[in-house]
Image: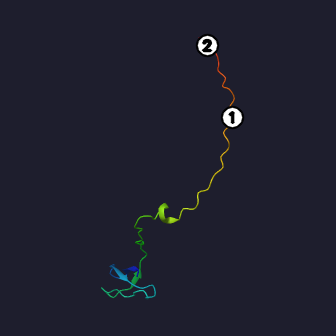
């Protein structure tokens, strides 16, 4: 179940509540009885364990054979005469 955060409009205190998605939002502050407003908070989502990245994300398929061009044939190498 998600954890919701509320902020009281009267006393300014912050409150947290574990609620179902179907539960109605809390409207009354437990401290002063003022009006509560639901806050938007970041999630606490964590990925743990091995194999999440390239290892376990998808199964390896058959290797594709790539065609390579035949090697170029080179003629005899030309040498320039040395100049002293």
Where residue 40 appears, as percent x and y from the top left, is: 43, 75
Rendering quarter of residue 27: bottom left
Outermost residue to the left:
31
Q: Where does label 1 land, which residue?
A: 73
Q: Establish if 41 lies above or below 77.
A: below
**Depth check: 45 or 84 in front?**
84
**Depth check: 55 or 39 in front?**
55
Mark 1 falls on what kind of element? Answer: loop
**Depth check: 46 or 68 in front?**
68
Residue at 68%, 26% in the rendered image: 76
| Quadrant placement of the N terminus | bottom left
Where residue 60 appears, as percent x and y from the top left, is: 54, 62
Q: Establish if 8 lies above or below 53.
A: below
- The answer to whether 62 appears left or right of 48 in the picture is right
Separation of residues labelled 1 and 2 (CA atoms):
30 Å
Give the mark toward the camera: 1 or 2.
1
Outermost residue to the top:
84
Rendering quarter of residue 4: bottom left
Q: Where does label 2 land, which residue?
A: 83
Where residue 51 appears, as percent x and y from the top left, is: 44, 64
Dot placed on the residue nearer the N-terminal end, 1 or 2:
1
Q: Establish if 14 lies above or below 75.
A: below
**Depth check: 68 or 43 in front?**
68
Mark 2 falls on what kind of element? Answer: loop
Classed neighbour count for the residue bearing mark 2: other residues with Cα under 10 Å, few (<14), some (14–19), many (≥20): few
Residue at 65%, 46% in the rendered image: 68
Where residue 11 appears, as percent x and y from the top left, is: 32, 81
Residue at 48%, 65% in the rendered image: 56
The numbered mark at residue 34 is none
Rendering quarter of residue 69: top right
């Amino acid at each position: 179940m998600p954890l919701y955060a509320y902020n009281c409009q009267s006393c300014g205190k912050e409150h947290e509540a574990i609620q179902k998605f179907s539960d109605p939002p809390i409207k009354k502050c437990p401290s002063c009885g003022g009006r509560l407003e639901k806050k938007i908070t970041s999630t606490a989502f964590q990925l743990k364990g091995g194999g999440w990245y390239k290892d376990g994300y998808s199964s390896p398929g058959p290797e594709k054979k790539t065609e390579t061009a035949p090697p170029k044939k080179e003629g005899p190498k030309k040498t320039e005469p040395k100049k002293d």
